[in-house]
């Protein structure tokens, strides 16, 4: 019986993984510029953490969590997102005691039992950030500007940053009542799920993709028109700061989020190029979450990007695998032994070198060098060995010249200068 992986959980193979590494290092660079430090938390937490933070009536908690009871009888869940775990760690280790402002980032797999399709998986990966301790709208604008800087750095355009405000516990209940009244008058036009949501989670009705629900809610009241003075001012200031630094955005008055912890600023980075899975990154404020999880009353804001979706968008824009600097083609036992030593020495000096392990013909070895896209090939046989030299072949124009083996490293480095970084390991 041959074993296969789990539906919706992907292997990331050589050739693809280079794009992931590129995205991860671009993110690390931008996050460091903005003063964020990495935090690593477990992929499993007590189920209660996600119920309390994401919300009992969300799709994630109701239908999508990988929950199981461990051998000790505790209900555990594979994390469906990162914010809850990071806040749990933040509170548990009292990170607020060391610094009133915590800026954290994380990368790793998340798990949701969703129906897999392009851009939507059951194990997917997020790169996320969380800033805790600041309610000043400048941090909202900074985080959004940082997100845009990341997309500029990786060369992705054709994205739109959409923002909204979801108010706070002071203004949202009155808005919610109005929305419920509006929806109750249109119950017959809503899908089965939304009819249920009218009482359990009415804001989610605004996010339903069903045509009937979209039509029925065209005129629905918007949270933005019902913000209290504090939330209204906060949102206006976020926009002023975004304008000041030239970060483009569009206000999306219908935007709601699939997690219940959000307050005030919420946002999504959307694309028209991924079909239904149009959000490449999403996030917002969660000013009540730390308190809700048993910590001090500290505000927070963050976002997470979906790495699979980023990689899909980047597509062929990135040249994938790095090629070796040099391939050593050796003929005969002694030359093969020497090729191995040369490879080892040059690797110790920081160059990627490949050899043949199968004692194949020169022609086959040249074919392999070509496949690996090595710009240079060193050819050595018994005769060259005896004279301490090799033939250095330039694959671009098939020219060749003799080089002394004792100067091989210097020669290769000199020849590669100006070339696109082949073989230089990061
Ligand atoms: P989210 O909107 O649930 O927010 O997910 C953030 C991003 O993760 C999405 O925009 C998408 O790119 C990616 N994503 C989500 N589900 C899947 C999936 N099944 N397959 C592939 N990609 C997916 C959060 O998770 C919040 N924790 C974000 C946040 C951080 N808010 C504040 N801080």
Image: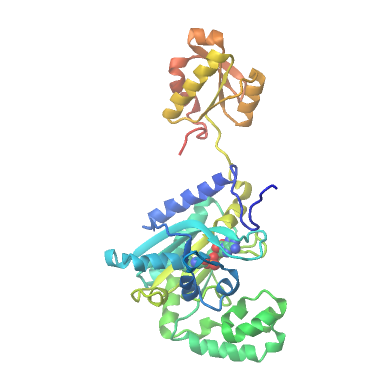
The x and y percentages for residue 198 are: 61, 85
- The image quadrant that residue 396 belongs to is top right
The x and y percentages for residue 188 are: 71, 88
Q: Can residue 11 be seen in this view?
A: yes
> Which of the pair 168/243 is nearer the observer?
168
Residue 255 vs 378, above or below: the answer is below
Q: Which residue is drawn at 60% across and 58% down?
A: 158
The x and y percentages for residue 142 are: 41, 64
Q: Which residue is drawn at 52% across and 20% down?
A: 339
Horizontal relation, residue 407 to residue 364: left or right: left
Residue 64 vs 124, above or below: the answer is below
The quadrant the C terminus occupies is: top left
Q: Residue at x 33, y 75 (%)?
A: 296
The x and y percentages for residue 166 are: 50, 78
- The image quadrant that residue 65 belongs to is bottom right
**Which coloring applies here?**
rainbow
> Which of the pair 8/98 is nearer the observer?
8
Residue 221 vs 272, above or below: the answer is below
Looking at the rendering, the quadrant in which ligand 1 lies is bottom right
Q: Can residue 249 be seen in this view?
A: no
Q: How many labels does the image show?
A: 0
> Which of the pair 346/276 is nearer the observer?
346
């Amino acid at each position: 019986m041959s074993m296969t992986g789990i539906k919706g959980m992907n292997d990331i193979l050589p050739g693809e993984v280079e794009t992931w590494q590129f995205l991860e290092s671009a993110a690390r660079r931008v996050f460091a510029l903005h003063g964020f430090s990495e935090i690593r938390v477990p992929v499993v937490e007590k189920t209660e953490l996600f119920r309390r933070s994401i919300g009992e009536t969300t799709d994630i908690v109701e239908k999508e969590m990988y929950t199981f009871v461990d051998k000790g009888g505790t209900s555990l869940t594979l994390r469906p997102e990162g914010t809850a775990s990071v806040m749990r760690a933040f509170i548990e280790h009292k990170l607020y005691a060391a610094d009133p402002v915590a800026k954290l980032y994380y990368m790793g797999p998340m798990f949701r039992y969703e129906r897999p399709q392009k851009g939507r998986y059951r194990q997917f990966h997020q790169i996320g950030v969380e800033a805790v301790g600041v309610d000043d709208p400048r941090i909202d604008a900074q985080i959004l500007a940082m997100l845009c800087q990341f997309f500029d750095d990786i060369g992705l355009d054709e994205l739109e940053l959409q923002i909204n405000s979801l108010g706070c516990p002071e203004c949202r209940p009155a808005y919610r009542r109005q929305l419920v009244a509006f929806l109750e008058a249109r119950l017959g036009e809503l899908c089965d799920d939304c009819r249920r949501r009218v009482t359990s989670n009415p804001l989610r009705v605004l996010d339903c993709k069903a045509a009937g629900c979209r039509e029925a809610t065209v005129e629905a009241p918007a949270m933005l028109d019902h913000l209290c003075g504090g939330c209204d001012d906060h949102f206006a200031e976020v926009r002023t700061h975004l304008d000041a630094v030239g970060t483009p955005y569009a206000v999306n008055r219908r935007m709601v989020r699939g997690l219940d912890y959000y307050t005030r600023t919420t946002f999504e980075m959307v694309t028209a190029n991924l079909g239904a899975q149009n959000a490449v990154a999403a996030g917002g404020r969660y000013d009540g979450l730390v308190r809700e999880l048993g910590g001090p009353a500290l505000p927070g804001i963050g976002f997470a990007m979906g790495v699979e979706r980023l990689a899909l968008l980047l597509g062929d824009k990135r040249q994938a695998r790095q090629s070796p600097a040099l391939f050593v083609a050796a003929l005969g036992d002694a030359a093969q032994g020497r090729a191995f030593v040369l490879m080892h020495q040059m690797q110790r000096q920081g160059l990627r070198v490949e050899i043949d392990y199968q004692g194949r013909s020169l022609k086959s070895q040249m074919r392999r060098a070509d496949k690996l896209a090595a710009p240079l090939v060193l050819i050595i046989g018994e005769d060259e060995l005896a004279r301490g030299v090799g033939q250095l072949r330039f694959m671009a124009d098939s020219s060749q010249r003799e080089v002394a083996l004792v100067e091989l490293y210097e020669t290769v480095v000199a020849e590669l200068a100006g070339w696109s970084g082949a073989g230089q390991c990061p």
